[in-house]
Image (cartoon, coloured by chain):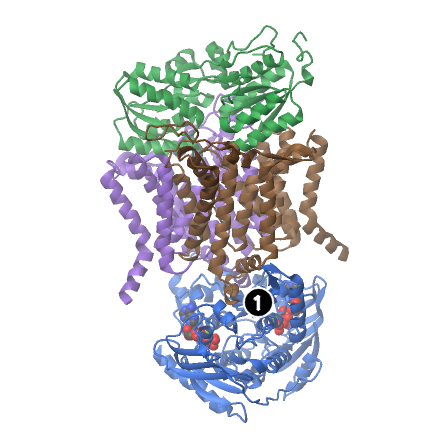
Chain colours: A blue, B brown, C purple, D green
Amino acid sequence: MSDQAIRLSGLHKAFGRNQVLRGVDLEIPAGQVTVLMGANGAGKSTLVKILCGVHAADSGEITLGGAPLVANSPSDALRAGVVTVHQNINDGVVPDLDVVSNLVLDSLAGGGGVFLRRGQMRARARQIAAAVGLEIDVRRQVSDLSLADRQLVSIARAMAHEPRLLILDEPTSSLSAVEADRLFDLVEQLRDRGVAILYISHRMSDIRRLADRIVSMRDGAISGVFEDAPLDYSGSVRAMLGHEITEVDIAIPQPGRPVLEVRDLVLRDGARPFSLEARENEVIAITGLVGSGKSDFAGALFGLAAPVSGTMRLDGGPHAPASARAAIDAGVFLCPKDRLINAVVADFDITRNLTLPFIARHSRLSFLSFRSERATAGRMIGTMGIVCQNPSDGILTLSGGNQQKVMVARWMAEAARLLILDEPFQGVDIQARRDIGHKIRETSAHRATIVFVAELDEALEIADRVLVMSEHSIVGEHRNENIDVSAIMAQVVDAEPARAAGQ
Amino acid sequence: MKDTSHLIDFAIKYGFLLLMAALIVVFGLNAEGFLSPFSAVFILQSVAITGILALGVTATLVVGGFDLSIGAVATSALMLSAYVMVVWEMSAGMAVVLCLLMGAAVGLVNGLLIVKARIPDLLATLGMMFLLVGLQRIPTEGRSISTGMALPDGSTAAGIFSPGFLMLGRHRLDLIVPDLLPLSVVFLVVIAVLVWVFLELTRHGRLMYAIGSNAQAASLAGANVNRYKIAAYMISGTLASVGGILLAARLGRGDVASGNNLLLDSVAAALIGFAVLGASKPNAFGTAIGALFVGILLQGLTMMNAPYYTQDFIKGGVLVIALVFTFALSGRGGRGRG
Amino acid sequence: MKDTSHLIDFAIKYGFLLLMAALIVVFGLNAEGFLSPFSAVFILQSVAITGILALGVTATLVVGGFDLSIGAVATSALMLSAYVMVVWEMSAGMAVVLCLLMGAAVGLVNGLLIVKARIPDLLATLGMMFLLVGLQRIPTEGRSISTGMALPDGSTAAGIFSPGFLMLGRHRLDLIVPDLLPLSVVFLVVIAVLVWVFLELTRHGRLMYAIGSNAQAASLAGANVNRYKIAAYMISGTLASVGGILLAARLGRGDVASGNNLLLDSVAAALIGFAVLGASKPNAFGTAIGALFVGILLQGLTMMNAPYYTQDFIKGGVLVIALVFTFALSGRGGRGRG
Amino acid sequence: ADMPAPLDNPGDVKVALVRYLSTGDFFQAYLSGVEKQAAAIGVDLRVFDSRQDAALQADMVDQAIALGVDGIIIQHGLTESMQAAAQRAVEAGIKVVAFDVNVENDAIPQIEQSDRDLARLALEQAVEDNGTEFTAGYVYVPGIAPLDRRDETWVKVKAANPGIKQVAEFGTLDNPIANSVANQARSVLSANPSITVMFAPYDEFAKGVKIAVDEAGMTSQVSIYSADVSTADIAAMREAGSAWKATAATNPAVVGEVSVRALAMLLAGEDPGHNVIVPPTLITQAMLNDLDIKNMEDLGKKAPAFAHADVAVPDWMPLPAR
Ligand SMILES: Nc1ncnc2c1ncn2[C@@H]1O[C@H](COP(=O)(O)OP(=O)(O)OP(=O)(O)O)[C@@H](O)[C@H]1O
Ligand SMILES: Nc1ncnc2c1ncn2[C@@H]1O[C@H](COP(=O)(O)OP(=O)(O)OP(=O)(O)O)[C@@H](O)[C@H]1O
Ligand SMILES: [Mg+2]
Ligand SMILES: [Mg+2]
């Protein structure tokens, strides 16, 4: 193996009484993609944060090409050539600055000169953006960008850095297939130039596509290394979970009464009207590219923005909620995507995050019943399998995947008529995804359920029916039985050239 | 290892209260009469008005806002109540009602400026502050209001501060000793308890904290963010007007020069509250303790004959040290922005 | 449809400047002498000190902080420079150097309290404010400092404000008309340009904006967040001490004064700056315009014989209207918090 | 030793000074006068500073009562808030004097520096220097008791002299006052270049006006008349060609001494009279120059009327060393 390799040995790290890393020994060779797998809370992001100088390890050492790598701060790490794309997308971009500044932020911070050279910066930024296929006006404020574009901005910056070690912590969590594909090409180019790459993902499709070797992690220690071709994917999953993965077996039940009827809905000017029906005991997945209008549709159902035209009916009556509150009162719940922006209340503990939307249920005459809150929290932590020390722990002390489970649990705590989940699996490990999916299907008898996912795999795991959304309209419908994946993919991607031309 | 971390936890949680206890002991030993019930009541009374204002500030801090106009609202209420009784010759009840309405209305306007016109909170309430500071002086052309004052039209004002109104600020209830407990202290305690109950024990308070932490998330969870934000500013405005009414009742005069330090002192109390019990966030109990702390410090120093400028110095010094203690140890900056 | 949106864009961008132009026209028509070059210079001179302080505040706002201690730093510099020259009988140069060092040191301590002890900015600088307000009065026991004053030890202070020092606040350069341009205006302009260049054109400024927007992301991209934050507070402290030096040179004595109004006025200027050119964020150009705006308003109103309380009222009213205009139209709240 | 009881044992006599205003030279000098006279008698002095918080000031009187003091000096404040507190003190058998605040109580001697006299002296000088016809600017902030009293005199003088034309009235208490008033005064001067007299009956105002007059280059045209004095004011008045022509003042330290002496007389069972008036002195630029007065100490030495007030001085009263 090349002596450019990065070696970690005996890394320990604890947060208070929570021993997160318990002696990690790991090698990341140059010119290969090392995939790190691990369940939510296994300690992957913590490991990454130690490598890139955010946290200090309690003990253990890291060497790069044989010499010790001491990164006391992110800038040290960057100087040593360790470049990271963090799991939390908002850790990667500065919203109040333009895309140009964001793309060259690390070189601004790295020093050199006092005055900005704007023309040069802009040219460089365009080049960096083009490399990852980011087709936006680089003078726009990042705060105006969608989350996917923000993620691309932080990826683009990292890619441009000529790293020795590139760490990607769930970089595709907000990307759909097209963007992800472009990312994979780039990762491969860098690998071929001899960069060591540490890739963290919960998506098997990413892993299958990229992995040269797989390292599994469990409970803060390495539980398996797989580097012989062909890679033993199921072995790696077993090593990471400690047991076999539960297989999903979708048995499509008999749908009940119609709950939601959508007629000739137009989500934005110029979009084709579409209709849709969702019934009790039915789980519908809607898939499509990022920006195809999934969130807009969810928003229309949840009262965040009125559709341009068309009617929505809920249980036979008209459904035109004027606000989120109105929608919730009508029994329409939305678990939004991008939890850190849209869902997580950082100052609250797990319990308070869980009970937020239905706090009225836990209060009498406006007075809170802490006991009732605790009971609900305890129940949901159990049913959703949330890994935590204590229900009164701060939400941010949870790993990303467990935070996501809390956010889904929040909306499963009460009975809905229509449950809408927008990207409910963002950052969730395979087993947890299965668990959440199972839970959603198991409880779906007395409501209609719509799940928005960009990943087709996820749609197939959970849905009775898969709808394809494109250009703010439904363009295809498939019953989840002997489904023709390539046909769906065609419908998903087909619209792309048209969309690009339209813009 | 574990012991130090326990110790630090303890220090974070109780450090501030211990510091306060230590202060009381030091003053008790050095300043004769400091430990009498009278002295305790004096301290409470001296912080009653700032304390009430600080509780209002706390409500706006909870929703992630800030109200710079409270001092001006309080002095406006002071002037308004005097004007209503002395110039318009109306009753005390009318004066109180109009002041409370004024405070709530100012809060409403602040809230609308912030949520509807989307003006940053500091900016909107700063503008409101200047506006009120000017407005409250226009009817009397900058003069104080007292019975017998000459009015711009040449007549003299015949109304008086009714005894019932003055009682609000001056009456003392019997408690153990006769004539011990001033009504204003009762108001402070009642309001502090009400605000505490509201913020900690009701769902409205819970939602306000959620809004302060992540307004977007709260909104998507069904909270009416705008309404709660406006409510917070209305609470703040109303409590500030209560403070102004008490001030008027104590002064017995619409004095334009009073109330200069109300804003800074009440902001200080609310911010010190962050450090109490390691809360690292705005909270009613902390605010009340913060106000009390400043009161104890000033009372003790006064009784030890410290000149006024050393009082400022020591107030600042103790504040900084207490804060270093709490925040540096807790290792997290709380909400960062006030 | 497009036309209205263009119009709105235009209003957001130039509305504030247009309002200022309108004010100038109104005052020019109504107040004789308002449009003379002297009047213009007067306005500049009257805002020089608050303007310089406001530029310091801007630096801290850029990194997402806030400095409540600037008023106290300015009055401390005022007292210190007087003390150095009058009591210690040192030179003007020494006075200036010591004041600048004091300002920078206070900024350093503020910065350390905020980044190392993790005390929320409002809280840390509020404590520092109280500390300085007391401290600056201790050496003279609360008295102003002037030549011939009696010292606590019974002697009289023999030092003087040297002419060189007084020139800083009083000398006028010839510009078209002889004796037109006061040095303090030159300082204001130079400092405004320097701060603008620093914030807009250098990579340090850009990183400071990045830190203010998302300190975590900036840190992960390799920026030394703590160092930049401390630097911002040091800039603020130093500029506040420059303001204090100019104040001392203008007054020619070490006046005991609270810096509260300096603080409020400079914060107002910095916040008004948000509305200039639709920036919706702290910026040096906006701050300078904001200071100028307040100066023009007050100069015009005073020239029209408006009493001081109507000036506050109008200042508040215009501020609120200008802000509604800018922020409501722009449809986004900028950085939300100050 | 030969003082009447209870002052024959002065160390056991506790006296409280309860202040409304404390920031600034006047108040600091007043305090030093109180301290000196109290030290000369030997009583135990406690100072309560309410920092312009009238409500707190009333509390502090109660606090002094609770402390069991023998005498209280109330320094400034609002009639409305102090009246009841002062009455409570009297009822508790405590001797009370009040400086510059009318507590409407027959048992309480009022120490006064007579603001009306201050204004009258300064304005008489203005009329003497400028005749009865001039264009005037006036600095005034209503709502501040001493300024309101000085204003009454100004209104009377204007009424008596229709030739006095007031073209501008301005004023602010924004801190630092001199700086803010300077800004206003300059605007006023450029709007009203015909002004020849500025009446600024508070030395901080006068200081600001002087800065503005100098900056506007109108030093030789405008004359400033004010009230109050300090070492720095003396220096400003004596600058070559200074526009600040005269000020009328009582020596705040003397007022402080008189306050303590009046209280001591009360304690000894003597009657200082209900109104104890400390007469003001007119201080003109010419006088300062002629006598070469550089600071307050010089002023006291060379203008004896300023240094002492033979008010409330019974035979047994020890005086501070001079
Ligand atoms: N700042 C922190 N304070 C306290 N505990 C933390 C902190 N950061 C992480 N942890 C804890 O460390 C453990 C590992 O978290 P980490 O984020 O490394 O998991 P992960 O493997 O990245 O999971 P995921 O797949 O969900 O992102 C979790 O139990 C988490 O609660
Ligand atoms: N604030 C914004 N400003 C400008 N464009 C935006 C903004 N928000 C979204 N967009 C763009 O509008 C388009 C539609 O967004 P929408 O949220 O409906 O897509 P989506 O299909 O829900 O995306 P996802 O797959 O991520 O859920 C996208 O191209 C997105 O980039
Ligand atoms: Mg992670
Ligand atoms: Mg979307």
D155 lies above or below B29: above
Q: In which quarter of the image is the C terminus of chain D?
A: top right
Q: Quadrant of the N terminus of chain D?
A: top right
A342 lies above or below B296: below
**Residue at 43% over, 73% down:** A320
| Amino acid on which the number 1 mark rests in the picture | Phe
B27 lies above or below B278: above
Q: Which residue lies furthest to the left in this view?
A: C29
- Which image quadrant for residue C264? top left
User: Which is more toward the observer, C91 or C109?
Assistant: C109
Q: Is residue B30 left or right of residue B108?
A: right
Judging from the image, what secondary structure is the residue with disc 1 in? loop
Whole-percent x, y for residue B151 in the image: 36, 30
Q: Which residue lies furthest to the bottom in this view?
A: A482
Whole-percent x, y for residue B293 in the image: 63, 41
Q: In this view, does A383 lie to the left or right of C75?
A: right
Callout 1: 10 Å neighbours few (<14), some, many (20+)? some
User: Which is more toward the observer, C154 or B175?
Assistant: B175
Q: Please state the chain letter of the residue tagged with numbered disc 1 in the rendered image.
A: A
User: Which is more toward the observer, C233 or B20?
Assistant: B20
Q: Is label 1's Cβ within 8 Å of ligand 2?
A: no
- Which image quadrant for residue A136? bottom left
Can the viewer see residue C260?
Answer: yes
Can the viewer see residue C63?
Answer: no
Q: Is residue D176 left or right of residue D82?
A: left
Q: Which residue lies furthest to the top in this view?
A: D315
Whole-percent x, y for residue A127 in the image: 42, 72
User: Which is more toward the observer, A214 or A442?
Assistant: A442
Total labels: the figure holds 1
Residue to which mark 1 is pinned: A358
Whole-percent x, y for residue D252 in the image: 50, 19
